[in-house]
Image: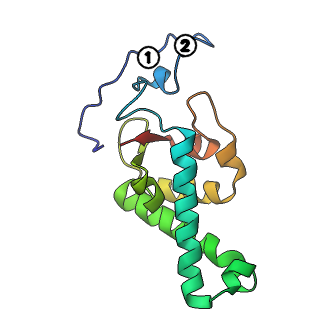
């Protein structure tokens, strides 16, 4: 969703703990459909797609060592994954897997992530722990650090 397009936002929750009926409500996001917080299923499938593409890309250059985790096969896929996620999130607003799963990464203001924010977010995703600690809006520490959120396209 381009930054200049108005999102059909719902009224925010009152701020009282526990009054949020769906993820993103307190941010004024819709419960479902376009612009709603992306569900975990879509996000996990997107991650699997991105990782598989990274493995295939590295495997094309080093052969089966990528599947055995030997040599470059140990860290090569992570490096390719990081570059792919950073570049595509900076340029298109989503990684390849997220594009396939119809997701977009935006700032909570609706703007696209600039390259620096996308880089910080990507590094935190690669560290894994920040991505698995999240709040009631399903925003992980990597999203909170750069003021981003994963939305449905």
Q: Is residue 145 above or below residue 62?
A: above
Which quadrant: the N terminus?
Answer: top left
Instruction: Give the spatial CA distance, label 1 vs label 2.
Output: 8 Å
Query: For the residue labelled by badge 1, is the local secondary structure a helix, a strand or a loop?
Result: loop
Q: Which mark is residue 146?
A: none
Instruction: Return the x and y of residue 115 as percentages of the image width and height.
Output: 43, 59
Residue 20 place in picture, x, y as percent: 54, 16
Please say whether residue 72 is visible from this viewpoint. no
Q: Would residue 92 be found to the left or right of residue 134 on screen?
A: left
Q: Quadrant of residue 78?
A: bottom right
For the residue pair 97 and 108, the one nearer the viewer reads as: 97
Q: Is residue 108 above or below residue 123?
A: above
Say few, some or many: other residues with alpha carbon within 10 Å of mark 2 (under 14 / 14 to 19 / 20 or more): few
Badge 2 is on which residue?
Answer: 15
Residue at 36 percent of width and 38 percent of height: 110
Q: Residue at x 76, y 84 (%)?
A: 70
Q: Depth check: 60 or 119 in front?
A: 60
Residue 74 visible in rendering: yes
Q: Residue at x 39, y 48 (%)?
A: 102
Q: Residue farthest to the bottom?
A: 62
Task: Name the residue that disc number 1 marks.
Answer: 12
Q: Is residue 35 left or right of residue 54?
A: left
Question: Mark 1: few, some, or many residues within 10 Å (few <14, many ≥20)?
Answer: some
- Would you say 26 lies left or right of 44 here? left
Q: Secondary structure at mark 2?
A: loop
Marks 1 and 2 close (CB-CB < 8 Å): yes
User: Residue 130: x, y in percent?
Assistant: 68, 47
Picture layout, residue 134 above or below residue 52: above
Instruction: Tell me which corner region of the image, top left, top right, bottom left or bottom right, holds residue 139.
Output: top right
Position of residue 58 measured from the top left corner of the image (x, y, whole percent)? 58, 81
Name the residue rendered at 50%, 40% in the picture. Answer: 147
């Amino acid at each position: 969703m381009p930054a200049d397009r108005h999102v059909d936002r719902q009224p925010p929750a009152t701020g009282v703990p526990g009054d949020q009926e769906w993820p993103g409500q307190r941010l004024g996001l819709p419960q479902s459909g376009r612009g709603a917080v992306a569900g975990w299923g879509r996000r996990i499938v997107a991650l699997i797609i991105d990782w598989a593409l990274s493995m295939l890309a590295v495997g094309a250059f080093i052969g089966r060592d990528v599947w055995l985790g030997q040599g470059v096969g140990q860290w090569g896929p992570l490096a390719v994954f990081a570059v792919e996620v950073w570049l595509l999130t900076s340029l298109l607003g989503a990684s390849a897997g997220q594009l396939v799963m119809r997701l977009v990464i935006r700032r909570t203001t609706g703007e696209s992530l600039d390259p620096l924010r996308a880089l910080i977010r990507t590094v935190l995703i690669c560290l894994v722990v920040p991505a698995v600690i999240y709040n009631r809006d399903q925003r992980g520490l990597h999203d909170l650090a750069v003021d981003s959120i994963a939305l449905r396209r």
